[in-house]
Image: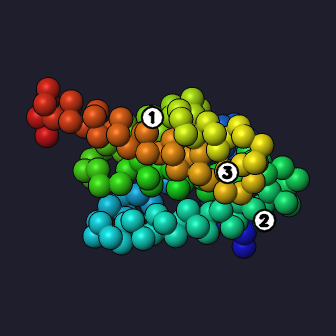
Amino acid sequence: MALVWATFFGVGYVPLAPGTAGTAAAIPLWWALSHAPGWAYVAFTAAVVATGIAAAGRAGRYYGVADSGHIVIDEVAGYLVTMAFLPRTLFAALAGFVLFRICDVLKPWPARIFDREPRWKNAAGVVLDDLFAGLWALALTWGAVLVKQRLLGP
């Protein structure tokens, strides 16, 4: 069960860019959750983070490396953080996708700490670097949505 969750139902086995595929697979989940009250969205996202850390730990032991490319539940958690409280629009979904992927690759502070520090080469580090990349992407996506609204209207 841990492998199923860590790979987000097998999406992590996509041969090219599994992290991007994991993020894309999170879009329908966000779309469904975007109808939920804010507290439920936050609670669900926290549950994905907590269970994602547990599943990533088991999967890392199975694959023999803490941050195996097959583990994509961290991208799911990061995308959900990115999209927290954003409007339910195609623009927001796509901007969040692109900006999260950029932040996930560039690893701005403090995401870089969780990605590179030896003490974080574990399941928590796998998920937390994407969580912090998601916080950066959340701010950037809100900025993009606000600029679009200002220039083009809602």
Label 3: which residue? 125
Q: Residues within 10 Å of mark 1 (few under 14, many from 20)?
A: some
79 displayed left or right of 34: right
Amino acid tagged 1: Val
**Contact between labelled residues 3 and 2, with CB atoms less than 8 Å apart:** no
Label 1: which residue? 98
Residue 83, above or below 39: above
**Mark 3 or mark 1, which has the lower sequence index?**
1
Q: Residues within 10 Å of mark 3 (few under 14, many from 20)?
A: many
**Which of the pair 115/44 is nearer the observer?**
115
Residue 7 in sight in this render: no
Q: Residue at x 63, y 39 (%)?
A: 113
Q: Secondary structure at mark 2?
A: helix
**Which of labels 3 and 1 is toward the front?**
3
Q: Residue at x 53, y 35 (%)?
A: 109
Q: Residue at x 16, y 35 (%)?
A: 149
Q: Residue at x 39, y 65 (%)?
A: 42
Amino acid tagged 3: Gly
Residue 69 on image: x %, y % = 73, 45
Residue 135, above or below 153: below
Label 2: which residue? 58
**Mark 2 or mark 3, which has the lower sequence index?**
2
**Mark 1 or mark 2, which has the lower sequence index?**
2
Image quarter in which the N terminus is found:
bottom right
Q: Secondary structure at mark 1?
A: helix
Residue 139 in sight in this render: yes
**Which of labels 2 and 3 is toward the front?**
3
Residue 119 on image: x %, y % = 75, 48
Image quarter in which the C terminus is found:
top left
